[in-house]
């Protein structure tokens, strides 16, 4: 798959029988528009997923792949910034929790959709981390993520500027030092709290 000159039919056979690569393959990066359309219409889902992974993709193919019924393709197309944010709810509804992390990585993911995914009982640590990292996450959504038992997720929440101020201030005194440290880096931290932290540090 690393050969930029591999024929498309051989590439399709290879990708159908090997593990999907984690980044765009040279052959699809150099493919013509016609070749991309051919791969995007392949009956082999992994071949369509290769197109979804391409660094630059015509909008028409982005929209086409957004309606793909295979989750392998959906996971790769959902996070693309070229995809209209209105499509994200459709993808999340069609494929459910397995695509939530990819949907949450989309820079234009709506706040309401982030909240619905965070509230889903099947949400995983990875999903909650992606949601907590999103600039559009609202305070009430961050509170759902803060309930996670995963410390990394809680640290991401603590550093998010949309976190409710009373909650943020409470995290400053959290027993876990790394959580308190993450809260201390929050750009929304009031000046009076920062002054208190400085005073505390000088006394220690």
Image (spheres, rainbow, N blue to C red):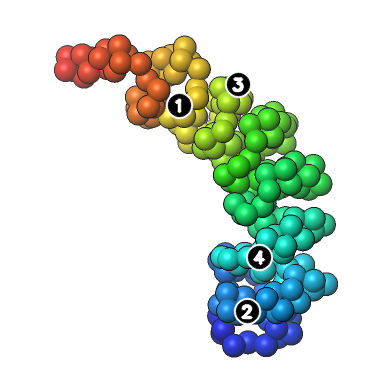
Query: Residue at (35%, 16%) from the top-left corner?
Result: 190
Contact, mark 4 vs mark 2 (Cβ under 8 Å): no
- Front residue of 8/197: it is 8
Q: Is residue 8 above or below residue 150?
A: below
On the image, numbered disc 3 is attached to which residue?
A: 140
Q: Nearer the viewer, mark 3 or mark 4?
A: 4
Q: Nearer the viewer, mark 2 or mark 1?
A: 2
Query: Residue at (58%, 66%) from the top-left corner?
Result: 56
Secondary structure found at label 3: helix
Characterize the local packing of mark 3: few (<14), some (14-19) or many (20 or more) Cα atoms within 10 angstroms.
some
Of the numbered discs 3 and 4, the one sitting upstream in the chain is 4
Marks 2 and 3 sit apart, C-alpha to C-alpha, by 45 Å
Marks 1 and 4 sit apart, C-alpha to C-alpha, by 35 Å
On the image, numbered disc 1 is attached to which residue?
A: 161
On the image, numbered disc 4 is attached to which residue?
A: 58
Which residue appears farthest toward the left when viewing the image?
A: 202
Task: Give the quadrant of the C terminus.
Answer: top left
Q: Position of residue 187 (x, y in %)?
A: 37, 27
């Amino acid at each position: 798959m690393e050969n930029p000159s591999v024929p498309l039919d051989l590439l399709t056979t290879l990708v159908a029988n090997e593990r999907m690569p984690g980044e765009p393959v040279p052959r699809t990066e150099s493919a013509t528009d016609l070749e991309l359309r051919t791969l995007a219409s392949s009956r082999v889902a992994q071949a369509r997923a290769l197109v979804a992974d391409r660094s630059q993709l015509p909008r028409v193919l982005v929209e086409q792949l957004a309606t793909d019924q295979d989750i392998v393709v959906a996971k790769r197309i959902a996070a693309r910034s070229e995809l209209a944010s209105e499509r994200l709810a459709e993808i999340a509804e069609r494929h459910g929790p397995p695509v939530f992390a990819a949907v949450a990585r989309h820079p234009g993911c709506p706040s309401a959709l982030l909240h619905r995914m965070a509230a889903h009982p099947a949400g995983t640590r990875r999903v909650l981390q992606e949601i907590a990292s999103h600039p559009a996450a609202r305070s009430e959504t961050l509170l759902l993520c803060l309930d996670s038992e995963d410390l990394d997720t809680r640290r991401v929440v603590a550093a998010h500027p949309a976190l409710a101020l009373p909650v943020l201030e409470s995290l400053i005194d959290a027993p876990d030092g790394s959580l308190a440290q993450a809260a201390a880096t929050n750009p929304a931290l009031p000046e009076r709290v920062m002054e208190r932290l400085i005073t505390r540090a000088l006394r220690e």
